[in-house]
Image (cartoon, helix red, strand yellow):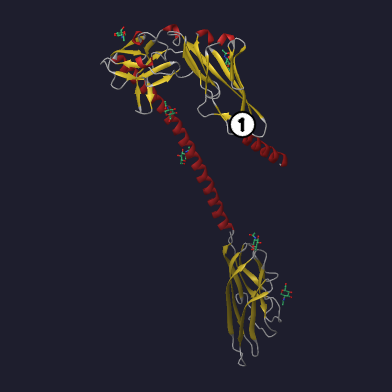
Amino acid sequence: MGTLLFTLLLTALVSESSCVQWSSSALKEDAAVYTCDNSDLTLSWDVSKTTGETILDVQWYYEGRSQKLIAMLAQGHLNVMPSFSGRVELTANAGIVINHVTTGEKGNYSVEVNAQTKNGGFVTLRRTASVLVGAEGLMIRDGQLHASQKAVAVFSNSTQQWHVALACGTFTYHDTPPFTLEWTTPSGQSVSSSRYKEGQFLLLLDNPVSGGSYTCHVPHSSASVACLHGNSTDVSSTVVVDDVKSRLTLLEAENQQLKGSVVELKAENGQLKEFVKQGNQTIDSVSTRLRQHLHDERTKQVSFHASGLNNTTPSSGDVLIPTTVLNNQGNGYNPATGKFTAPYNGTYCFMSSLWGQGSGHYIAVYLMVEGKQELYVHTTFGSAGVSDTASLQAVLSVRAGQSVWLKAGGDSNQFFSGSNHNSFSGFLVSYDL
Ligand SMILES: *[C@@H]1O[C@H](CO)[C@@H](O)[C@H](O)[C@H]1NC(C)=O
Ligand SMILES: *[C@@H]1O[C@H](CO)[C@@H](O)[C@H](O)[C@H]1NC(C)=O
Ligand SMILES: *[C@@H]1O[C@H](CO)[C@@H](O)[C@H](O)[C@H]1NC(C)=O
Ligand SMILES: *[C@@H]1O[C@H](CO)[C@@H](O)[C@H](O)[C@H]1NC(C)=O
Ligand SMILES: *[C@@H]1O[C@H](CO)[C@@H](O)[C@H](O)[C@H]1NC(C)=O
Ligand SMILES: *[C@@H]1O[C@H](CO)[C@@H](O)[C@H](O)[C@H]1NC(C)=O
């Protein structure tokens, strides 16, 4: 981390201090430069520097067969090698013009600039240009222009249409030639090429295609840059366009495009099917879960009802134990202990119907949930000893494993015996998900 920071800092310092650099207008690295036989070759390299910086020397090389020094600039003095003697002019800080270059002098030219920076450091800048020297017609393969009609139509992004394309070339420039070709249409109009591709200028014909002769040629204004020193219209080529054949070419292209669209549609259809399949799988998984849920709803049904106390005169704190079990869905109620144990976390409803009698006695009962007194009922029969009933109801949240029971609240409880008296019942209202 520290090393990285230090490196970054050093890099920043070094790049800040080396202000001698290529001007933005200078030829880029490996730029293609064209000139014609016996003409001037302009190598527009240039460096910019700030005050306090010194260019120590500049050297230019030609790398035809082996590296050869062309000239050297040192201490303001330009030394030109004998083979370039009298042909080299200095331009800007690192550029030169070489007069009367010949076709044999094509190849790579390079420059090396040695400079001293403000803080005494040394900087070397190097660049190379790839030079082609054209003789009359040499930049065209066979020395001849060849106009032809492309067998396949070309789609234009700007018109969003297919076009019959005419081609004219073939040029041997490293990249785009420094001029464009002009075309003369059957109606005598002059139009520029639409684009340049793979050594050929293309003309996209307007729809509907006008049949007739189309001639490509180098415009007069570009004759010298194209190394055509004579009458440039002498270098031309003509193609005869048949409008019926052209319409077929367009139809074919449109047909191909339609076929392509059908393939795309098929692929899209496949994707849609896959999408539907995934949808189906989602629906399947949801419906499986729904079925499981409904199944759970059925199996998680819990209810119980028991009556008939085993002891009609319980002591204070005794559990009231109804022993006649009429319903015990889910087996939560235990008639041996009188306790209901919740099988699930959930909301439960509990009820009790109690009936007792006897002078001086009463009914005093608690509803207990895991040892906690949740509800209390109390009746007093009075001295006449008439019978009386008591009831309790509660809807409670109970956790799985917790027990619920009825507890005698004093020592003078007295209930009726009989299996259909004194009930304890309950059911699950809903379980927690
Ligand atoms: C010029 O340089 C390029 C890349 O540096 C190299 O591929 C090419 O062969 C060179 N051309 C000549 C004529 O030396
Ligand atoms: C035409 O448009 C397509 C897609 O937008 C693009 O890939 C292509 O390069 C464009 N062609 C031209 C010649 O502009
Ligand atoms: C160039 O040649 C064409 C056809 O050969 C001729 O019509 C035209 O007049 C000539 N132009 C000049 C400037 O000589
Ligand atoms: C999706 O489910 C529907 C209805 O069950 C069925 O007709 C269709 O074939 C399924 N599609 C796929 C791709 O599984
Ligand atoms: C009632 O049942 C409990 C628990 O089984 C038992 O302890 C108790 O003695 C029983 N009472 C009578 C009167 O049978
Ligand atoms: C029941 O509820 C308790 C407390 O909220 C929780 O810790 C426990 O996991 C729950 N049990 C089930 C089976 O959902």
Question: Residue at left 46%, top 31%?
Answer: 267
Which residue is at 40% across, 7% downward? Answer: 144
Q: Position of residue 368 (x, y in %)?
A: 66, 74
Q: Quadrant of the N terminus?
A: top right
- Write down the residue under mark 1: 53
Question: Ligand 1 near label 1 (Cβ, under 8 Å)?
Answer: no
Instruction: Tell whether 270 sits left or right of 374.
Output: left
Question: What is the secondary structure assignment of the residue under circle 1?
Answer: loop
| Residue 272 location (% of width, % of height) | 45, 36
Could you say which is closer to the camera, residue 272 or residue 390?
272
For ligand 2, the image quadrant comes to: top left
Is 301 drawn above or below residue 85 in the view shown?
below
Measured from the top left, where is residue 302 in percent x and y?
Answer: 59, 63
Q: Nearer the viewer, residue 39 or 106?
A: 39
Residue extending furthest toward the left: 187
Q: Is residue 96 above or below residue 348?
A: above
Query: Which residue occupies 72% across, 42% down?
Result: 2
- Between 382 and 83, the residue placed more toward the observer is 83
